[in-house]
Image (cartoon, rainbow, N blue to C red):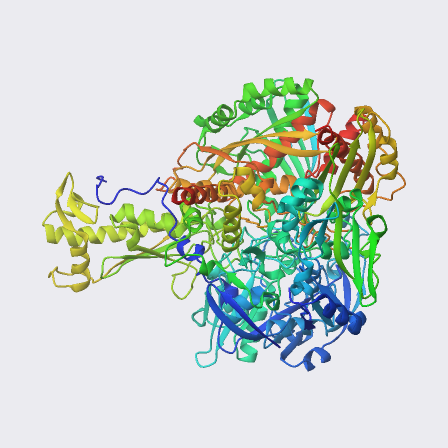
Amino acid sequence: MRKVTITVNGERQASEIEPRLLLVHYLRDVLGLTGTHVGCETSLCGACTVRLNGDAVKSCTVLAVQADGGEVTTIEGLAANGKLHALQDGFWEEHGLQCGYCTPGMIMAASQLLERNPNPSDDEIRHGLEGNLCRCTGYQHIVNAVKHAAKKLSAAR
Amino acid sequence: MASNPVIPKTIGTRVKRREDPRLITGQATYVDDLRLPGMLYLSVLRSMYAHAKLGKIDTSKAKALPGVVAVVTGADLKGKVGPVPCPAAMPELKMPEQPVLAIGKVRYVGEPVAAVVATSAYVARDALDLIEVDYDPLEAAVDVEKAAETGAPVLYDEFGDNVAFRAPVANPAVDEAFKKADRVVKLRIEQQRVIPMAMEPRGVVAQWDRGQKSLTVWSSTQIPHLLRSQLAESFKLPEIKVRVIAPEVGGGFGAKLNVYREELLVPYLSMTLGKPVKWTQARREDMAATTHGRGQVEYVELACKNDGTMTAMRCKIYADLGAYLQFFTAGIAGFTSLLMHGCYKIPAIAWETIGVFTNKMSTDAYRGAGRPEAAFMAERMADEVAAELGLDPVAVRRKNFIPKEAFPYATPGGLMFDSGDYEKSLAKALEIVGYDKLRKEQAELRKQGKYIGIGVSTYLEICGLGPSVLLPPKLKAGGWESSTVRMDPGGTVTVLTGASPHGQGQETSFAQIVSDQLGVGLDDVLVLHGDTAIVQAGVGTFGSRGTALGGTALVMALEKVKTKIKSIASHMMESPPDNLELGGGNVFLKGSPDKALPLAKVVEAAFGMKAGIPNLEPGLEATSYYEPNNCLYPFGAHIAVVEVDADTGQVKFRRYVAVDDCGNQINPMLVEGQVHGGIAQGVGQAMFEAAVYDESGQLVSGSLMDYAVPKAAMIPTLELDSTVTPTPVNPLGVKGVGEAGTIGSTPAVVNAVIDALRPLGVKTIDMPLWPEKVWRAIQAAKGGKS
Amino acid sequence: MIPAPFEYHAPTSLDDALKLLGSLGDGAKLLAGGHSLLPALKLRLQSVDHLIDIGRVASLRYVREQDGKIAIGALSTHRAIESTALVRDKCPLLAECAAQIGDVQVRNRGTIGGSLSHADPAADYPAAILALEAEIDAASAKGKRTIAAADFFVDMLTTALKPGEIVTEVRVPVLAKGTGGTYLKVPQPASGFAVVGVAALVTLDGSGQVSRARIGITGAAVKGYRALDAEKALAGKKPDAAVVKSAAALATKGVETTGDIWASSEYRAHLTQVYAERAITAALTRARG
């Protein structure tokens, strides 16, 4: 067992965990933050995407001990002061989700995409989300959702 | 109904989903999100062999691992739980018994062999590595055609061979037409196996209440009520002692329209151990041991005249059933044969369907379930007729369409098509894509050595299942759907639906129906589903039936509630009920919206009973069950434009246009979403996805490392439009749309690629159109071998 | 989905890491970004007694210009390499290659040292590293040595690294004017790994002749390799389309190409040649500036 301190969604969390515990299981099972989902075991589906020290990462391919001392943002921590993030709003407005299972990871990956490229083309969005699978939407409404958010964010700038 | 300025009509508008706030904030609860006090965790050991005799299974080391609570094998469960129920019934169908854990033999890679229950998921997984199993490997029957031959390795010794059923439907008129035909075109088509791959793998939590002697099961399922009935039967419990909850379900696509071994195993262990037990499927387990889709080899022949008129069609279908029969495993190919003529007026059809056991996971419903195969057959054959006669593929289609005047149309397979206007959706799609101009551009680019292809698919499907007689006779459900509408004392409305949406958005579209009919705001409507303790009897969501059936049941229940509202208001307003209408939160006199009584007052009267209305039964609630008298037949036209790199065989999309007709649309945004997702899955089958088993029966593409679910950049920008041809079958005039995209897209894409390569002499390429296959087809054609 | 248990060590200096690696021996494995190792552990294709997480060895995380070369600390992520201006401007071939690895999340975590040490035959880096004739520094408790790219990839999942060695730095050249390079890849649609990846680097002299050509290939065989025959066929030639085509046709000469469901050996060889031709052509265009 190993002691870790990880700041999750702005709150410092101290826990004693097995070194083999995956970050996604730490978030879901230790902290009860079940908004981050598990969709595969080969780091391909992206459902488990969270931000770790600013980077979008697949939390199924990070040990919780690797995040020791770090900062994690999950879907639960994205809305600030009860106000939806522009991406959450975009996904809602543009019907960017159906079953919702890929959605938290998709939104977290998209949040990095928009930080790096505030005004992406359709093609850049599609390539920028290559680490996230969706089986419901055919991606068209997801592309629209990200564009919606990009517009809203740049208007706010 | 009179329009109302306060609460606008919502049907036909793009209402934002009421499901979304919980989903976009990470607050939804899927099965794996459940945490119950004292919960134990199940992990399943699965066969690494496709076909093997099971010898000794030594579980002693696993049992000794700290944290392990129980380890069970097939022998432990025999006579206690199982077999897995299967309602399939066909003449002379061979029905194997499917144990919960393998007994005697394993018959596919991924078949459950043993199970561990432990205090944590990590320990349960560790224990699997400590179970020792003696396997005596046998030769596997993998290829469906070879498996049907005598001398193939046999899965069930008691059956003698692997042919589960043979369903020949001969038709002398067909033989006659083929004799008289000017031309006959033939194709061998492989409908490769694909993996449904809902983003949420399956999962089950069970909790046995010792005091109540009742069982609660949470399952990632499309059919909570059906599962409850089957569990009650399996565990010999009255249905009132079984509650099934389908919480948030992360996609199904037909693969969660079943009762699986784990859905018996988890409850059994919870009942035995007296603690809640959870099982969450890992992705690789999902890919190996959740039903697959498609899996057919078809030999198709079409007779036609020199002018392109189709006169008869016949096919022989080998259906790759896999090792066991799940709910609809044996029935899927039936849809294919019934609809093989697509939207064409072909007077005579005949078929032979051969269901074959193979050492693979069972096939069953997957988005479209038999209809994508049918549409693919019809649409590929239409193109072959065009190529054979040197006609434009569009012209061949137009020549053979069932004309819109012909509806209702009795098909040669015995179905009754409700409504259709195939020319209309085709014309619209051609206009959007700019077909004539595209053909010119294609000719120009060909001269420059560029291979552009235009693929047209004018598909048709059957959905909204449907009259109960069409479902397997032993299935513990019919083809109906149910709804309850309950007005609450505060004026809000609770809807209970037997449909069990898992992404389709009926919490929104059903609220729209209620809002429009009762004149209450969307925020005042709550749609509940997926819990057998809350919802009256129901069937589930599959086969594009949710809105057509569940929506109609809702309308029927609403009618009853409205009648009561009007009858109460009639007393209060002193006007006959027929003179009253609902809207804008009021009951008002027809033609005089100003003479209105707030609906809230009526509700108050119904619940408060202080208005002194004689003989009034308190409450405002009604339940309806809707049994349709026919299926529904949506259709549409999809056009794919591709460019093939002849040096590598790589295919790139240039355009994708789809015009679908699902009748009236409650919420066009949701309709679009369904079509988009369907297209992506259809494109996936055409271009990327294949459950590849090698000769020994190993699932080579058994993880996302080798199974290519399309990523965003692999799907083109989708240009959508629609036509509206309402169905007369239900009062909403709606057909289904959940599967339409999948059905229309696959042939459009394949036709496009073949169209691109037609000048080189390429006639057919088996799906998925992986670059190497395309390249080889080009090489073979160049060498004159195609 | 769940790795077997292991002991975990998180040294913060290279010395400590080397000491641990030396003392723990065969049962120990290094964890850098974890994007090759963790999936293998989760699928239990691999198990370890001791995991030495070198992710906290900050001294291995840098990208800088040094003695006319670009020195890249082994813990630099693919993302760092793809986005650092120094690499983009002075060795765009490597930045292009890094940008095509896996996906965004993978590039955020995966490291060049980890990827090279794992030596997946379908990884992207080998093509670029070989074409660039990179130098790879490896350290052990006994000292430090430099391994030439050409000597680094030994076999499938096997490198020239000896037990106890850690990759510490990768050095690539600053590309001079007249030199052009590119990395072209056929991604396997599911995994994103390279079905075939070709890195071409060419230098033109004043008269427009090829003075130097380096072609690195990945995905095609059990390990990355240099297409030496193709390089020779270009050297000293005026590279018109015919020259490029015939050189590219030599890209798999003497190489046993591998086969899987995505590409048979025959098709993979063909694809390698087609992509070699395209990569050389693109590199030449850049070299001409």
Q: Is residue B122 above or below residue C169?
A: below
Residue B177 in view of the camera? no
Q: Is residue B362 above or below residue B77?
A: above
Q: Is residue A100 left or right of residue B193?
A: left
Residue B595 in view of the camera? yes
- Residue B734, given in percent of the width and then of the height, sits at 40, 41
The residue at the point 73 percent across, 60 percent down is: B156
User: Depth check: B67 or B738 in front?
Assistant: B67
User: Depth check: B740 or C220 in front?
Assistant: C220
- Residue B193, given in percent of the width and then of the height, sits at 66, 47
Q: Is residue C246 above or below residue B222?
A: above
- Residue B61, given in percent of the width and then of the height, sits at 72, 79
User: Depth check: B61 or B77 in front?
Assistant: B61
Q: Quadrant of residue B394?
A: top right
The residue at the point 21 percent across, 49 percent down is: B585
Q: In what quadrant of the picture does the C terminus of chain B appear?
A: top right
Q: Residue furthest right?
A: C254
